[in-house]
Amino acid sequence: MADPVTNVETSSARQDGTDDVIQVKDLHVHFHTALGVVRALNGVSFNIPRGKVLGVVGESGSGKSITGLSIMQLVPPPGRMESGEILYKEKPDTAKPLNILSLGRHSDEMRAIRGDDISMIFQEPMTSLNPVFSVGHQIREAIMLHQNPNEDEARAQSVDILQKVGMPNPQRIARSYPHELSGGMRQRAMIAMALSCTPALLVADEPTTALDVTTEAQILELMRDLQNDIGTSIMFITHNMGVVAQMCDEVAVMYLGRIVERATVDDIFYDPKHPYTISLLRSIPRLGTNRGQKLETIKGGVPDPYTTVTGCPFHPRCPSFMPGLCDTVLPVETIIEGKDHHTVRCHLYPGSTPEQVADGDGRVTGTSGTAPNTGRAN
Ligand code: SF4
């Protein structure tokens, strides 16, 4: 079935035989505030293949974190999920995926999914860790809530998982309180808690941003090892392209609540298509840059969240802006010719310009264009 705001087909199974642990379809999340409506997500659609790592990148305000929180049904008020689907498939042979948005935010089913099936780790570990309980106690609680072992088994498992995340002397760490640990150790403890129930999907929101580079490298290696061992899929939210190169299989680039480009990590770095992706990559410091040479910056800033940009949301900052087209017509997602796994939303590419002109909000209500139909889930 074609997504209403893209030219790309969506399906529950990909044609290359892999299956998706999660599919997000045309998700709209708005914040209704006294100053107006902030459209945080404007039709976000993507999938995460089982066992793979999807990097989600973009500047602050692009909607990365809200996308992660939506999957957990943890969007804070006054945010509201207006429409869309989040389809979760626990195992490859699960007959019918579960639409997470059909579950109540505080329902028992949703509570069971959080932690057991889908876990989330944050930039600040104290978001997850309770300061008044020991680390071991908190991991045991998570294990007992979701797996139902006896107290002794849960205790042994909690020490085991602390060892797996590279904690020296895990018995002692299990007895420690979060404030007794360093930042890197707290981060490991949070990862241990998130992974203690072997989730099918881990949503990691800037998990290493607050750490020094050595600890960051250790944590990233640890997550990659655990992902290989357990087979957990990861949605890795970051603004750090270096981390993306190290961690991810595929990358989704977000701008103003939309995914503007999606490709394998190699294509994003070596053959980026969207002017925003190209600008993001040019703003990274590189080895070999001459001393004194200024880094390129992206012109302008992210627009005020209360304003609605007509046409392509990136047009006020785009070096390839085409007047009369980019500022009036919202490009739809299209597949780059010859690359099934590379999609882009930009009028520079065939199939991205719909036949119908956008409405007053810059949204295309019909579908058209000439993008090839590959059956790939977007
Ligand atoms: Fe730039 Fe136009 Fe492409 Fe938007 S659609 S990224 S403004 S060229």
Image (spheres, grey):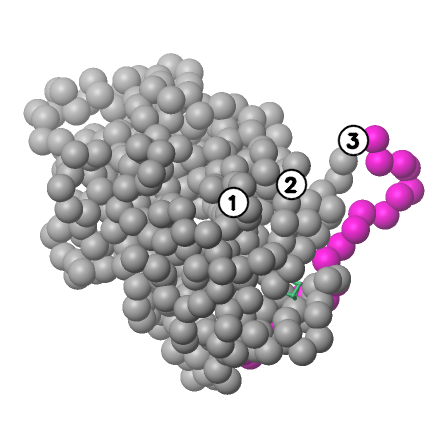
Q: Earlier in the sequence, mark 2 or mark 1?
A: 2
- The foreground one among 222 and 29 is 29
Residue 171 appears anywhere in the view = yes
Residue 304 appears anywhere in the view = no
Label 3 secondary element: loop
**Quarter assignment of residue 213:** top right
Q: Mark 1 points at which residue?
A: 342
Separation of marks 3 and 2 at Cα, in angstroms: 19 Å
**Quarter assignment of residue 346:** bottom right
Q: Which mark is residue 287?
A: 3
Asked if labels 3 and 1 touch by Cβ distance under 8 angstroms, the answer is no
Q: Which amino acid does label 3 sit on?
A: Leu
Q: Name the residue under label 2.
A: 271
Residue 316 image point, x, y percent:
68, 71
Between label 3 and label 2, give the one nearer the viewer.
2
- The foreground one among 165 and 82 is 82
Say left or right for 98 vs 11: left
- At a point 49% along the width and 34% down the height, the residue shown is 248
Say if disc 3 is inside 8 Å of ligand 1: no
The crowding category of the residue bearing disc 2, from other C-alpha atoms within 10 Å (few below 14, some 14 to 19, many at least 20), is: some
Label 2 secondary element: loop
